Image: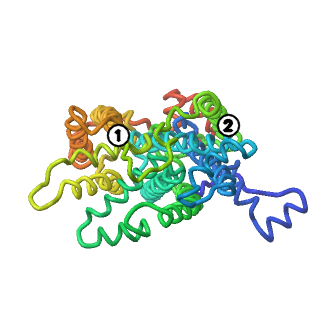
Amino acid sequence: MSFPWAKEYKPGHPLMQWLDEKLPLPRFVYNAVGAGYPVPRNLNYMWNFGVLAGFCLALQIVTGVILAMHYAANGSVAFDSVEHIMRDVNWGWMLRYAHANGASAFFVVVYIHIFRGFFYSSYKAPREMIWLLGVVIFLLMMATAFMGYVLPWGQMSFWGAKVITGLFGAIPVVGQPLQVWLLGGYAPDNAALNRFFSLHFLLPFVIAGVIILHIWALHIPGSSNPTGVEVKQESDTVPFHPYYTAKDGFGLGVFLILYCAVLFFAPNMLGHPDNYIPANPLSTPAHIVPEWYFWPFYAILRAFTSDFFFIPAKLMGVLAMFSAILVWFFLPWLDTSPVRSGHYRPLFRKAFYLLLVDVVVLGYCGGAPAAEPFVMISQIASMYYFLHFLVILPIVSSIEKPAPLPYSITEAVLGKDEGAVLHANPTAA
């Protein structure tokens, strides 16, 4: 967004002047993350998670590229190559654990980032494109993570690939050919492993490209803020640097402490022990389960246990699982309330907390065995999940009476004291 009070980039050194004239990269960085990018002054720590997500992606790319130098995408040696990385490659154990736990950290950060967007309605105009690109990034993350889960070629890797790719077989007419095309055969083997390894290596760079578009789209309307009130005056903003670079740096430090605690003291906490058993097509695990960040959607998939007229239960589960994410694309038009922030929307706030509990319940059921009472609970939770987005949210946004909004961000921060406001912005007089 072009703010009239934003500082202009004026290089002082002759070399920087020449570079700015020939290739204005310093100007681009200055306007993107420097003092040339004014940001609402009231952002809280929930706005740290975008930067943390970018850090997680960089961490995954760096560790992934190094691991790829030692990994062999062949069914007969893939499992052994992972053990070779763990035992024989210098610092290989740390790289492998950093990559595996980095994926979990990435999803934790992104899930918080998404639910912050839900609560503060970050999907509303004029930021619809930012939200839509964010959902695309999440879908690419899920595809990348699934393919990465297959690469260790343990029991859970093999059977997870067999179950998940088998879902495509439920699609009428094109399902079976699509499944064979994905696997390169009729069951997970060398062809599937090569395909998944290639795509797992490629997709993070695609994600990085979409993130650039995501940030580009963000800089057009500017950042949202906890009040949902748009920037009206210079006193509503502060430069991104040094104020939010310092704040993001503190958040990154806290994140790294927690991440390193898991990495060095509980690296297998979020993994599955069956994946330390080599893949065996003749031995089905007692309980096939994906990684934890897929559990809510896995619970929705398993919630459909009976055919509905001529629609098989398996197909309904597949459609519901994908629809659980695709419905996010329509949020800018499902939520019609003129107020963004959940702080000023009492009914919306209660519905949001119920959704949060519902997703946690779905996650628990997704990681539990496919037996009662977990199946019944996941059916009820799945029903509420779709009711929230398709019924409750539109109704609440139409009937609720929001609390009064502050006139400006400055008023929200400093209060209605005119002296304080005028001191922050003398031109307001």
Name the mark on residue 372: none
Q: Eyeballing the image, is 27 above or below 392? A: below
Type of residue at label 1?
His
> What quarter of the picture does the C terminus occupy?
top right
| Position of residue 11 measured from the top left corner of the image (x, y, whole percent) | 83, 57
Secondary element under disc 2, as helix, strand or loop, is helix
Q: Residue at x 73, y 46 (%)?
A: 89
Q: Quick one: 62 or 273, which is closer to the camera?
A: 273
Q: Which residue is mark 1?
A: 287
Q: Which residue is mark 2?
A: 249
Q: How many marks?
A: 2
Q: Residue at x 86, y 67 (%)?
A: 18
**Residue reaching furthest to the front:** 282
Type of residue at label 2?
Gly
| Position of residue 110 measured from the top left corner of the image (x, y, whole percent) | 49, 44
Disc number lying in front (1 or 2): 1
| Sequence-wise first label, 1 or 2 | 2
Q: Residue at x 43, y 35 (%)?
A: 406
Q: Quick one: 89 or 117, which is closer to the camera?
A: 89
The answer to whether marks 1 and 2 mark residues whose Cβ atoms lie closer than 8 Å is no
| Position of residue 245 measured from the top left corner of the image (x, y, whole percent) | 68, 41
Horizontal arrangement in the rendering, residue 301 relative to residue 281 (left or right): left
